[in-house]
Image: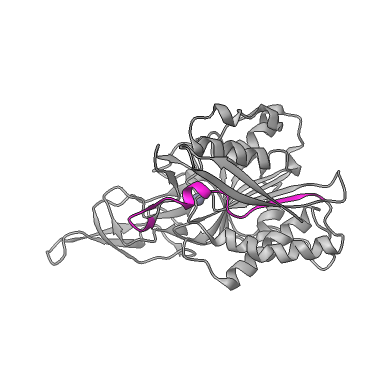
Amino acid sequence: MEKTIERLAGDSDGVAYEFPVYRFKGSDAKAPTAYLQAALHAGELPGMVAIDALMPLLTKAEAEGRINGSISVVPWANPVGRAQYVFGELEGRFHLPNRVNFNRDFPLIDKPDVSLLPDEGDLSTIDQRLKARLLRLSVGHDIVLDLHCDDESTAYLYVPAVLWPAMQDCAAAMGVEAVLLWEGESGAAFEEASLQPHLASGKERLESLVVTTVEYRGIADVDGATAEADAAGLYRLLVARGVITDTTVTKPGRFEGVVAPLENIDMLPAPKAGAVLYDTKPGDWVKRGDRLATIVHTPGEPGGRTEIFAPQDGYILTRRSHRITRKGDDLVKLVGSKRSDDARAGALEA
Ligand SMILES: [Zn+2]
């Protein structure tokens, strides 16, 4: 394993950012290659600790000569967001000076060729240079995994519809509960920027690609046992796709979890501001008309509560981690079996 340090100049003199990259060299130039990154939204750590638990497995595979395709690992993808504390709270999702989401506005290129990426010297802000750098590290790999997490959630994947069902083995290997299929534009999220060069060039065999945003449960699901289980899932995926050889790992079966297009999701915006009393939690199945939550908006007064009911049968994928809400804030992701009346255009929420 080789460790290198990526360095990015900040937007003012005397400020620079660094993050490490770990590379395991493959023995077979024809084998699929993999790139894993975590904490692009800087405070989302389940993927980072999963990578920490994965590294000994990779190191062992390397020592035993079982790594076929090269693997690049970036456990801390966002040193810029990681430094953004505001009144004691980490703001790792948006770049504070320009309010741009760290997982949007990646450069889109038409071929898997890093020479097509913009010259970092021409990019005016550090978040843009970071995005160009992450693509410079990832473009060209057959498997690109971007590890995130939701608020409170079961484990799920965003997968480009064009890669499904070819990626079914990956979802099964990772042991996630659900897969959300997206198509069209996502505001140039990292996942879209990783897929675009292959789609646009039209030459690649898409079924050999793996591109996904992994939502490793909720923001507080950072613990040793879960990290070990997620690392085992990532390892199974790498074995299933031939990046690593390991005869002790069984082939993943069919994916038996929830699969739905993004348009089937109901987000249930809060009708009032107040405190949220949830009746459901991630992983629950609900029927149309079941109460999902109650908003306490005028405490102590008759009519001071407003109830929210399921608009269709479905699976509760996520809910918010905070219990105070503004009017209009989305409260859950309910995955239904048909198009939601509240279906939203385009983007991933990742
Ligand atoms: Zn995220």
Q: In the image, is 206 to the left or to the right of 160?
A: right
**Vertical position of residue 200 compared to residue 341: above or below:** above
Residue under the image location 24 percent in, 54 percent down: 273
Span of residues in magenta: 69-89
User: Does 71 appear in magenta?
Assistant: yes
* Picture coordinates of residue 195, whole percent (x, y): 64, 37
Q: Residue furthest left?
A: 301
Q: Nearer the viewer, residue 56 or 301?
A: 56
* Picture coordinates of residue 228, whole percent (x, y): 64, 69
Residue under the image location 63 percent in, 45 percent down: 6
Q: Nearer the viewer, residue 10 or 93?
A: 10
**Vertical position of residue 222 compared to residue 1: above or below:** below
Q: Is residue 196 visible?
A: yes
Q: How is the image coloured?
A: one colour
**Vertical position of residue 118 compared to residue 231: above or below:** above
Residue under the image location 45 percent in, 48 percent down: 93
Q: Nearer the viewer, residue 108 or 82?
A: 82
Q: In the image, is 89 to the left or to the right of 105?
A: left
User: Does 111 appear in magenta?
Assistant: no
Q: Is residue 175 visible?
A: no
* Picture coordinates of residue 216, whole percent (x, y): 55, 59
Q: How many marks?
A: 0
**Vertical position of residue 246 compared to residue 347: above or below:** below
Q: Nearer the viewer, residue 220 or 313?
A: 220
* Quadrant in which the N terminus appears: bottom right
* Picture coordinates of residue 220, whole percent (x, y): 47, 65
Q: In the image, is 256 to the left or to the right of 89?
A: right
Residue under the image location 61 percent in, 28 percent down: 119
Q: Residue furthest bottom?
A: 225
